[in-house]
Image (spheres, grey):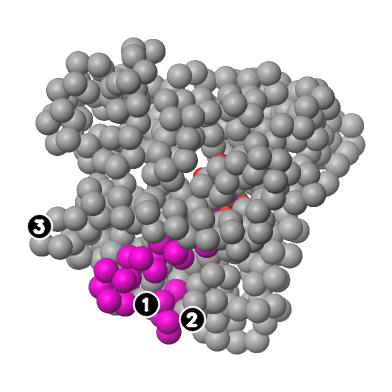
Amino acid sequence: MKTTDIVNDLEQKHPGEKEYLQAVTEVLESIEDIYNQNPQFEAAGIVERLVEPDRVITFKVPWLDDEGKVHINLGYRVQFNNALGPYKGGLRFHPSVNLSILKFLGFEQIFKNALTTLPLGGAKGGSDFNPKGKSQGEIMRFCQAFMLELWKNIGAETDVPAGDIGVGGREIGYLYGMYKKLTRQHTGVLTGKGLNWGGSLIRPEATGYGVVYFTKEMLATLGETLEGKTIAVSGFGNVAWGAVRKATELGAKVVTLSGPDGYVYDPAGISGEKIDYMLELRATNEDIVEPYAHEFDGVEFVAGRHPWEVKADIALPCATQNELNEEDARHLIDNGCMCVTEGANMPCTPEAIHLLQENSILFSPGKASNAGGVATSGLEMSQNALKMNWTAREVDDRLHQIMIDIHHSCVRYGKRPDGYVDYVKGANVAGFLKVANAMLDLGVL
Ligand code: NDP
Ligand code: 2IT
């Protein structure tokens, strides 16, 4: 296999799908050696079969706003690979959603889900619907209209969607309600459900908790801990919230949050009621962090910029793809940052990753460090199948162990002779081997 040949071929077939090609290129570069050392993969066409989704479902979502005006959005589900288990991955509602973004996310999800050690395939879906400024009623009607099309293609043993940007507990409720009405079944087909109707404790905070557990393991390789460390976080959504909570609990100080409007710098640290306020801010659907700076003393709001210019020991990008570029990485390095752990999916550009690794900064790709969210979704599925609920402690302990195991896998396949761990390579090789070997066993499909 030659990565460049395969990527060139994909570029011809899917012109302009830049996020998808970026994600594929990163994985193929990491696995090139192991692929070429194992001719059985080439013989079975594993890479050619892996890079194309099993199927892409697209549909129209018509809905009525509060004034009775008709709107049409596009809906998608990309079912990428189910070698390891039912298709599994979130739904994203954001105006930027297009096929390239969902294919990149679905492709990443295959390897992430493989790393969790749970029986989960990879998928992603969503819509270009913009929840910003919409009323509760409009969001409900949109979710219902979306599910009216999607329901035929999903199922507890077929494809299990969940949340992502713009889709949290409220949206999962409306989606699940419609699914339940159409099928007359209460099978737990979505994860991230409310606690009263099949959800799991710890799922809302799981992605962020997992990011911090993973960071703790990375630091331990240098004999370091989170105690007393300063952390810059971007975003203020599901993932950022959990990360801030756990990092604070483990003795670190989080000094930034960010939104599309800019970032807030809180030198006293974001803890206690400030973390609750972050959730309230998110629930307004306004998508701005500036009010945080007016609510608490001593906080600065920096409009239109990213938090990576702030001095921090650790950076946790938890907002969106390609939000930390080479220049940002340079700022972090110059300011003595020792660790960058991706909470979002693909938030660092390839150039930024290259620079961080060149400077021996600890760096983890989202597919390893944010896998705690989908892993806990897997635990929610287990509880649904058992018709039982585990305690918060039980779920958290399992999540913690899964993150430790993912870290082990990354070290196993990513440790260089000089001792530096290339977590990108480690995660990609470990995830790939599991999926590729399953595909070999299952025949050409
Ligand atoms: P949320 O919708 O809860 O939060 C995302 C936040 O990031 C929003 O405030 C969004 O604002 C903001 N944002 C988007 N673009 C930018 C930007 N350029 N600069 C600053 N902020 C921005 O989403 P999640 O927390 O669920 O997801 C965040 C990331 O984590 C995504 O990459 C997602 O794929 C990933 N992830 C999520 C998991 C989950 O379980 N929810 C699990 C694993 C990964 P706006 O909408 O206005 O752009
Ligand atoms: O990117 C992700 O891993 C998620 N948005 C969570 C997916 C899930 O199925 O819980």
In the rendered image, the residue lying farthest to the top is 444
Near mark 1 (Cα within 10 A), the count class, few <14, some 14-19 or many ≥20, is some
Q: Is residue 190 visible?
A: no
First-in-chain label (1 vs 3) = 1
- Label 1 sits on a secondary structure element that is loop
Whether the residue under disc 2 has CB within 8 Å of ligand 1: no
Q: CA distance from mark 1 to mark 3?
A: 24 Å
Residue at the image position 72 percent from the left and 32 percent from the top: 187
Which residue bears the numbered disc 1? 225
Residue 229 part of the magenta segment? yes
Disc 1 + disc 3, Cβ < 8 Å = no
The span shown in magenta is 207-231
Q: CA distance from mark 2 to mark 3?
A: 33 Å
Residue in front for this viewpoint, 98 or 177? 177
> Which label is found at residue 251?
2
Q: Is mark 1 within 8 Å of ligand 1?
A: no
Compared to residue 437, the image places residue 329 above or below, namely below
